[in-house]
Amino acid sequence: DGGITQSPKYLFRKEGQNVTLSCEQNLNHDAMYWYRQDPGQGLRLIYYSQIVNDFQKGDIAEGYSVSREKKESFPLTVTSAQKNPTAFYLCASSPWSSYNSPLHFGNGTRLTVT
Amino acid sequence: QQQVKQSPQSLIVQKGGIPIINCAYENTAFDYFPWYQQFPGKGPALLIAIRPDVSEKKEGRFTISFNKSAKQFSLHIMDSQPGDSATYFCAARWSGGGADGLTFGKGTHLIIQP
């Protein structure tokens, strides 16, 4: 079945450590996204990528970095510069062909930093 | 500035009742309005979407009502069931917005009591 795989489902890190969240899709979608979800805050866009080797900052990119070396993969690194990294992180993709193409989300990674 | 305002933040309805979730937007350039449904521990999934040239759209028990002049749209769930208990997000997008053009409301946590 086609879809988006995020791993791991739960991740625990000590403060000051960088951590990388994995996102892989086999939907052949051009665009990929990272969102952060906090209780009562909705979904906030961190980074997005329309094509390989290109990505753009979203609304809350500070303290995060991404890469897009392959169409299928869009890993997110939460750096030690992110002041409040504990959150639920969602990866999504969409076919770039149409603005009203739906976003397909993975099942998220819950990151806890102590 | 929040471009899509969603209310209520939480809602409890008895089985068979009709929960109504409301969203209001400010940007008149928005031209695509999807609703996403999210179950605990999962990523959001597209539920139903509407464009501003239509005042109402039904898919099964879910209906979107759209009021372009008031810049408001709402989700109604007919004959609600406990399995509809989830968090619902409205969103808006404009065709010129590119890959980052989807703006989400903050979500409504809906509980359908048996």
Image (cartoon, rainbow, N blue to C red):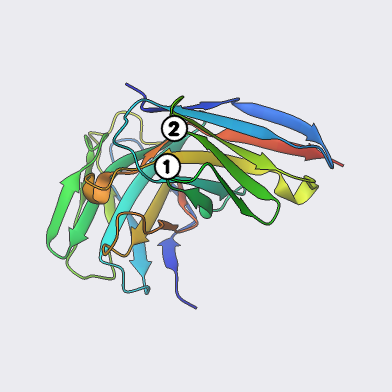
Instruction: Compare residues B24 and A48 and report the one nearer the observer.
Output: B24
Report, in whole angstroms, how far the alpha carbon at label 1 lies from the one at label 2.
Answer: 6 Å
Toward which corner of the image does residue A30 lie, by quadrant?
bottom left
Toward which corner of the image does residue B97 lie, by quadrant?
top left
Judge whether A106 appears above or below B104 on screen: below
On screen, residue B39 versus residue B3, left or right, reads right
Residue B13 location in percent, x, y? 78, 33
- The residue under label 1 is B52
Instruction: Compare residues A5 and A96 and report the one nearer the observer.
Output: A96
The residue at the point 56 percent across, 25 percent down is B7
Residue A72 location in percent, x, y? 29, 70
Amino acid type shown at disc 1: Pro
Instruction: Compare residues B24 and A38 and report the one nearer the observer.
Output: B24
N-terminal label among 1 and 2? 1
- What quarter of the picture does the C terminus of chain B occupy? top right
Task: Identify the element where label 1 is drawn.
Answer: loop
Residue A101 seen by the camera: yes
| Pointers 1 and 2 in contact (C-beta within 8 Å) | yes
- The residue under label 2 is B68
Task: Identify the element where label 2 is drawn.
Answer: loop
Q: Badge 2, how many Cα within 10 Å: few under 14, some, many 20+?
A: some
Residue B96 location in percent, x, y? 21, 45
Toward which corner of the image does residue A91 lie, by quadrant?
bottom left
Q: Badge 1, how many Cα within 10 Å: few under 14, some, many 20+?
A: some
Instruction: Compare residues A114 and B72 and report the one nearer the observer.
Output: B72
The chain containing the residue under callout 1 comes to B
- What quarter of the picture does the N terminus of chain B occupy? top left
The residue at the point 37 percent across, 73 percent down is A27
